[in-house]
Image (cartoon, rainbow, N blue to C red):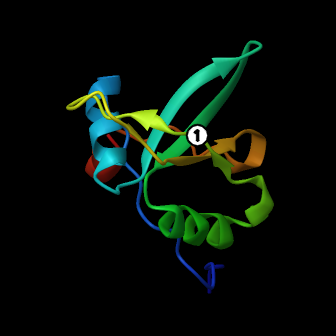
């Protein structure tokens, strides 16, 4: 029998266009934004739903104290909104999704 996490993390999505990801995050979804920092792959997992981010962190073993608060502008209105993100690096960085993984593409 294979290993399964006791708690499955909430689903996140990735987007080709940053604006689409930001709108998803502003609507309370989890947006995974990949980029490089000092030449190393990393990602931000962003949302206006702090509880959803905390559930994700608990499911993958990230200490809640690492959750970062950063108000972001809603691209539809230009109004700053409360938002939070995880810095995901190393073992916390999800693998690249294949084209058939629609929730994450």
* Residue at screen point 45% across, 35% down: 72
Question: Where is 86 relative to 17, above or below?
Answer: below
Q: In terms of image quadrants, where is residue 10? A: bottom left
Q: Position of residue 92 (x, y in %)?
A: 70, 49
Between residue 45 and residue 5, name the one nearer to us.
45
User: For the residue labelled by badge 1, is the local secondary structure a helix, a strand or a loop?
Assistant: loop
Question: Where is 26 relative to 74, above or below?
Answer: below
Q: Is residue 32 left or right of 22 when viewed as pictured? A: right
Question: Where is 41 relative to 93, above or below?
Answer: above
Q: Position of residue 5 (x, y in %)?
A: 63, 78
Question: Where is 67 relative to 70, above or below?
Answer: below
- Image quarter in which the N terminus is found: bottom right
Q: Is residue 57 left or right of 76 when viewed as pictured? A: right
Between residue 85 and residue 62, name the one nearer to us.
85
Q: Residue reaching furthest left?
A: 76
* Residue at screen point 26% across, 48% down: 102
* Residue at screen point 48% across, 33% down: 33
Q: Is residue 55 left or right of 13 when viewed as pictured? A: right
Q: Position of residue 54 (x, y in %)?
A: 60, 67
* Residue at screen point 75% across, 48% down: 91
Q: Residue reaching furthest top?
A: 39
Q: Position of residue 100 (x, y in %)?
A: 27, 45
Q: Which residue is mark 1?
A: 70
- Image quarter in which the C terminus is found: top left
Q: Is residue 43 left or right of 74 when viewed as pictured? A: right
Q: In terms of image quadrants, where is residue 80? A: top left
């Amino acid at each position: 029998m294979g290993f399964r996490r006791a708690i499955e993390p909430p689903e996140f999505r990735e987007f080709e266009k940053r604006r689409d990801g930001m709108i998803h995050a502003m609507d309370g979804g989890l947006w995974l934004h990949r980029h490089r920092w000092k030449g190393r792959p990393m990602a931000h997992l962003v949302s206006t739903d702090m509880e959803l981010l905390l559930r994700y962190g608990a499911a993958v073993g990230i200490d809640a104290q690492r959750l970062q608060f950063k108000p972001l502008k809603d691209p539809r209105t230009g109004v700053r909104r409360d938002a939070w993100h995880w810095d995901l690096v190393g073992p916390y960085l999800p693998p690249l999704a294949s084209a058939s993984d629609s929730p994450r593409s």
